[in-house]
Amino acid sequence: MVVIKKLVNYFLSILIVLFSFRGFAQDSTKTKKLGLIVKADVPLPVADLVFSKVERDMSLTVEKIINRRNSVQVTGTYHFIKANANSPDSALANRRNIFQIIPEYKFFILKRKVCSGPYVGAYLKYIRDEEIWDEWTETINYNAYPNTKNTHFFADYYYFKYAIGAITGCQFYIRNRVTFDFLFGVGASKTFLVQKVSGENIGTVLGSDLDGRLAFNVGYKF
């Protein structure tokens, strides 16, 4: 019930944002369009609710139309995992909090409609990935008294990642308002790791890796 309540609150928040922008658009002018699209990756939280007991996702994207074939957008995402450390779904931690900010540029290949159809572009990405271990381990020693010993282990890891890559996708509209946007991208990332154990910094690590983007956004054009 708590998960369902959180999901309902998430969708209600999206609707409030959409209708707030719509009201502003109608009050500001009736002759000029804002060229603004507000959208969210709706299938992702639904998939989490159906297929996963420990993962939850939320996202919100705002896109600004520059002209017929060019637009820019900024996406904010939040990914949460809460599981037992011994679970295969735990991603090696009791809890994870992943925040992403992703600015993107989109160039639309066709000229027939404003920012509609297939497109190519590029993205930048900033990620803060926090992994938290907080658990007790019981050790049994039959030669000692008492024969059990409880050990508390706590560790907190912060990963800061910057990424750049290319995207491709397709965007279309229903009645020129309701927006659907499928996006896929690949790139490279650079990771800066600040590792904390029991509140003490023990070192930093620099590394590079592959990076990716995948989203199916649903929204409204103002």
Image (spheres, rainbow, N blue to C red):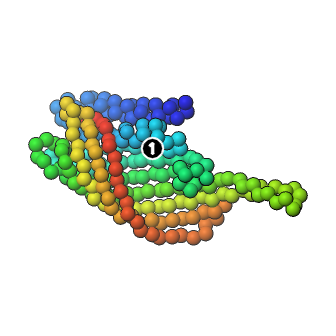
Q: Secondary structure at mark 1?
A: strand
Left or right of 100 in this view: 222: left
At 79% from the left and 57% from the top, the residue drawn is: 140
- The spot of residue 82 in percent (x, y) is 56, 46
Residue at image position (72%, 55%) is 137
39, above or below 140, in the image: above
Q: Residue at 53% across / 60% down in the picture?
A: 158
Toward the left, the furthest residue is: 112
Q: Quadrant of the C terminus?
A: top left
Q: x%, y% of residue 221? A: 25, 36
* Residue 211: quarter of image: bottom left
Quarter of the figure with residue 175:
top left
Say which residue label 1 marks: 57
Residue 156 placement (x, y as % from top left): 60, 58
State whether residue 115 is above or below residue 160. above
Up the image or down, 14 lies above or below 158; here it is above
Q: Is residue 20 visible in this depiction of the protein?
A: no
Q: Amino acid at mark 1?
A: Asp
Residue 204 visible in this rendered orientation of the protein: yes
At a point 37% along the width and 31% down the height, the residue shown is 15
For the N terminus, the image quarter is: top right
How many numbered discs, if any? 1
In the current view of this chain or complex, which residue is farthest to the right? 145
The 10 Å Cα crowd at callout 1, few under 14, some 14 to 19, many 20 or more, is many
Instruction: Describe residue 99's horizontal placement relative to residue 221 as left or right.
Output: right
Q: Is residue 147 left or right of residue 13?
A: right
| Quadrant of residue 150 within the rendered picture | bottom right
**Percent from the top left, x then y, of residue 87?**
58, 50
Q: Nearer the viewer, residue 128 or 31?
A: 128
